[in-house]
Each structure stands twice: as structure tokens, then as C-alpha cells.
Amino acid sequence: MTESIKGMMTEKLNQALTAERLALVNLPKLMQAATSPKLKQAFEQHVEETKGQISRLEQAGKAMQQELKGEPCEAMDGLAAEAERIIAEHKPGPMLDVLLIAAAQGIEHHEIAAYGTMRSLARSSGLDEIATLLEQTLQEEKATDEKLTILAESEINPKALQQAA
């Protein structure tokens, strides 16, 4: 049980590190399953962003004089398992792309909540360097979520609806 803000920050940073490492494993699976070239590209771009996010988490750990090793993140494990189930149960096509976006946005929303919480804790604790690192990642996660929404509304959802008609 975490008894201090520093302890909680360290725990949350470790969970975020685990989540981002898991994303590096799962994003290529989403990319491979996607049929939309734009969706594949969005997943590929987020793989590159995720590498930078891992680096920033490691920097935040160093700034707190903590070596981050990762801790279990049951929420991200569940979200990743859900994405794998979706891929296994659906054949390629527009409907699978809709489901992949839904799964990816579930992951993004979890990350947005986690990074927002950590950033706020860092700010409140006067850990400005860490808050800045977390803010950068938070903005990337929000931008990815927005890109996925735009892609869903402009291309993916209409194709799935057209196919279903």
C-alpha cells in the first residue's frame, strides 16, 4: 500500500511503463489486423510515439531518483486481451477496423486518465520537470485519440455502415 505521494508517483510511473511496453507489443498486432491504410499508418505512428513516451517515463524515474522496472497494470492487460480477442473473432474488413479503433481508444482513454493524474500529482508536488514530461505524453495521447475519432467518423464508420447495408 502506497503511503506517500512520491511512492504513489513511483508506482504509477512503473504501471505506465508496463502499459507502454505492452503497447509496443500490441500496436503492431492492431496494425497488421487493420485493413484501412490510414488506420495502419495511425497505429504505426503511435508505435514511434510510444518509444518516446517510454524514454520520458525513464527520465521521470531518474528525476525522482527511482529506477523504473515496471509493475503490473491489470487495466492495460485487460484492454490488450480485449483487442486480441477482437482480432481473433472477426475477419478483416471495415467492421474489424471499427472494433480496432474502439479497442485502441479504450487504451488511449486509460492512458489519458493515468497521465493526467500523474501530471497533476507532479505539479502539486513541485516536480515541474516530471510534470512537463508527463504533459508532453498526455498531449500525444489526446492527439492520438482525436486522430482515431476523425478517422472513424470520416472513413472507417461510413465504410462499415455501407458494407452492412
Image (cartoon, rainbow, N blue to C red):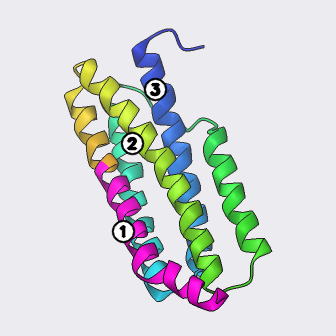
Residue 140 on the magenta segment = yes
Q: Earlier in the sequence, mark 2 or mark 1?
A: 2
Amino acid of disc 2: Leu
* Residue farthest to the top, as pictured: 3
Residue nearest the observer in this picture, 119 or 14: 119
Q: Earlier in the sequence, mark 3 or mark 1?
A: 3
Q: Where residue 105 sits: x, y (%)?
A: 50, 59
Q: Where residue 46 sits: x, y (%)?
A: 42, 66
Task: Give the numbered dot on residue 10.
Answer: 3
Residue nearest the observer in this picture, 99 or 144: 99
Quadrant for the C terminus, please. bottom right
The residue tagged 2 is 57
Does 1 sit above or below residue 80? above
Quadrant for the N terminus, please. top right
Q: Secondary structure at mark 1?
A: helix
Q: Secondary structure at mark 3?
A: helix
| Neighbours of disc 1 within 10 Å: few (<14), some (14-19), many (20+) | some
* Residue farthest to the right, as pictured: 89
Contact, mark 2 vs mark 3 (Cβ under 8 Å): no
Task: Give the numbered dot on residue 147.
Answer: 1
Residue sitting at x 40%, y 60%: 145
Amino acid of disc 1: Lys
| Neighbours of disc 2 within 10 Å: few (<14), some (14-19), many (20+) | many
Q: Where residue 142 sits: x, y (%)?
A: 35, 54
Amino acid of disc 3: Thr
* Residue range highlighted in magenta: 139-165
Residue sitting at x 39%, y 42%: 57
Gap between marks 3 and 1, in whole Å? Answer: 30 Å
Task: Give the numbered dot on residue 92.
Answer: none
Q: Where residue 119 sits: x, y (%)?
A: 32, 33
* Residue farthest to the front, as pictured: 165
